[in-house]
Image: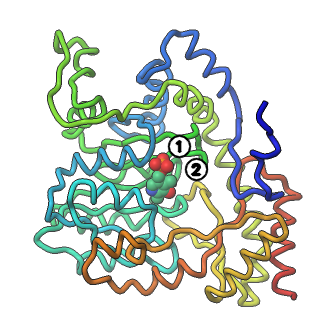
Amino acid sequence: MISMTKARSKSLIPFNKPFIVGKELHYIAQAVTLGQISGDGFYTQECAKLLEQTFNIPRILLTPSCTAALEMAAILCELKPGDEVILPSYTFVSTANAVVREGATPIFADIRPDTLNIDETRIEEAITDRTKAIFVVHYGGVACEMDTINDIARRHQLQVVEDAAQGVNAFYKGKPLGSLGDMATYSFHETKNYISGEGGALCVNDRELIGRAEIIRDKGTNRQEFFRGHVDKYTWVDVGSSYVPSEIASAFLYGQLEMLDSISTRREQIYRFYERELAELETEGLLRRPNIPAECTSNYHLFYILLKDHQTRDGLMQYLNDAGIKAVFHYIPLHTSPYGRKLISSPPKLPVTEELSGRLLRLPMFYDIKESELQQVVDTIRSYFQQ
Ligand SMILES: *Cc1c(COP(=O)(O)O)cnc(C)c1O
């Protein structure tokens, strides 16, 4: 037998923990009973339908990860070597990898100090004759300034892809994230709000892209048309890969999506607790809490604090870790990473990105976290500043 204690994290309060809210395990068993655990069985289709209806998106294709969905989006943008794509440097590697894999060049723009989203006022100056698309990231489930970004894209005839990995069930001016760009991507990785271990989805809002998206997802074949009876055999018609998730992951995900709102209600409670309890430290000038602009409805994906400087952040992170509380920083700006530096000949100046990423600390946030654990996190932060 394997040792369970060895596998368990050393921290008393982990940063994240997978959770079950409803019928996830029942649905996995049900998938086996139904006789299909490869892709596009009952649960994969039901998840897609539920998401399409809830978020008013013409076509949602479930994928094995958000990374896979971003790769599909980059293929669908028809990026070629020499093309440029504008995106934030403050993001997960997959946003940039999708662009780089097509031979295109990522052009990094700075972020806004209030939301840490791409600064929409810095996009236009980055546009050249080679620009093909803008990939935006809704950090922490708080929307980018999408009206401005879509307007810029329209004027310059660029495609917009939303990396909404963290943005499932969040809104901008009442409209769901994922429904605002030509395409968008969701993640159901175990660190996100709605989980299936590994998982993702491509949201296709531009209806003209739906047919090709289905082909790319199914190894470059027209199998989806074959299933619909439109062709009498299926064959290789385009590039593609294996971008269909396992039915087992989709069955688990369906159990989570059924509980969409109770999961976000719980996350909001956690967020509000931190927000309330840390207000005084902000008044004392010791930290800054996150900001949600009035036009954005968050899904409360994460709670971060911004410390005075890099040293204070690292000090607090160590202090919390020593107390058994796992708090973590977030992205190392991609333009300062080893591969990022290799890709770009002259590194851009992104002062907000560089400064804020060094001062940011994320606090434990997961569905099952107890009130006493939240209290312990807050008390430990307070005692750090009283040393
Ligand atoms: C988590 C995340 C991804 C990657 O998601 P996977 O499903 O793990 O591939 C991409 N972009 C952002 C912004 C993320 O937060």
Q: Position of residue 8 (x, y in %)?
A: 77, 47
Ligand 1: does it lie within 8 Å of the C-beta at label 1? yes
CA–CA distance between discs 2 and 1?
Answer: 6 Å
**Colouring rule applied to residues:** rainbow
Question: Disc 1 residue type?
Answer: Phe
Cβ atoms at labels 2 and 1 below 8 Å apart: yes
- Element type at marker 1? loop
Q: Residues within 10 Å of mark 2 (few under 14, many from 20)?
A: many
- Element type at marker 2? loop
Horizontal side of residue 251 vs 25, given as left or right: left
Residue 259 visible from this viewpoint: yes
Comparing 129 with 38, the one in front is 38
Residue ID for mark 1: 188
Residue ID for mark 2: 192
Q: Position of residue 290 (x, y in %)?
A: 61, 72
Q: Report which quarter residue 307 is drawn in.
A: bottom right
